[in-house]
Image (tube, grey):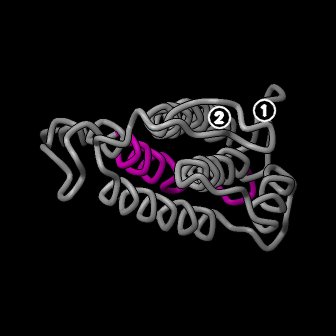
Amino acid sequence: MSQQLEVWMRGPIAGVPTLLQPIAHALLQAQEEIHANLKDFPASKLWDTPFDCASVAFHLQHIKGVLDRLFTYAESKSLSEAQLAALAAEGKKQPDITIHSLLAALDAQITISIAKLQATEEYALGVPRGIGRKQIPTTLGGLLFHAAEHTMRHTGQLLVTTKILKHGS
């Protein structure tokens, strides 16, 4: 059985400008790996924190939230009250949250992020942007790149946590 090629090896993502392709590829690769590794994941372990590592639920909430926040900053907007409340709730155990609801929220946010990449003009990547209340200086390209690398960082951590928790089952 041949293994499926990684997303970046499958060609361009329709409508995404050339310079933004690596960002789209990273987000879609993360999505695929997360779904594959959470298949058959025991729901009872969603909030477990092995060796004081962040829970699977936290990583799923955080990836979704980071994408939402960074793409908001990319549009030169401030975070809304709802975004700030979501940030404050990341990692706090909530009994009504399920693996399926977290994955659905992640998938929706990745879809939104890809659509925003499709609407981004390459010439604007060097345009200054500010992060947060302090307006920490960066560029549009810097924000978008960080969205991809931060997503992959937490995806890697999530995959290790998932493996530890599955092994301990």
> Residues at badges 2 and 1 in contact (C-beta under 8 Å)?
yes
| Residue at the spot of label 1 | 50
Q: Which of the two residues, 125 or 33, is positioned nearer the viewer here?
A: 125
Residue 113 left/right relative to 25: right
- Reading the chain from its start, which is encountered first: label 2 or label 1? 1
> Where, quadrant-wise, is the C terminus in this rendering?
top right
Percent coordinates x, y for residue 100 in the rendering:
58, 68
Percent coordinates x, y for residue 45 in the rendering:
73, 51
Residue 108 in the image: above or below residue 160? below
Q: Which residue lies at the image location 52% right of the left edge and 40% below the top edge?
A: 147
Residue 27 in the image: above or below residue 142? below
Under circle 2, the secondary element is: helix
Residue 70 left/right relative to 92: left
Mark 1 surroundings: few (<14), some (14-19) or many (≥20) residues within 10 A: some
Q: Which residue lies at the image location 70% right of the left edge and 31% below the top edge?
A: 136
Instruction: Judge whether residue 38 is colored magenta.
Output: yes
Give the residue type that dot 1 points to: Pro
Highlighted magenta segment, given as a residue range: 26-45
Q: Which of the two residues, 70 or 90, is positioned nearer the viewer here?
A: 70
Q: Which of the two residues, 135 or 110, is positioned nearer the viewer here?
A: 135
For residue 119, what is the image quadrant?
bottom left
In whole angstroms, how far apart are the C-alphas of marks 2 and 1?
7 Å
Percent coordinates x, y for residue 36 in the rendering:
41, 49
Residue 69 appears in the picture as rendered = yes
| Residue at the spot of label 2 | 161
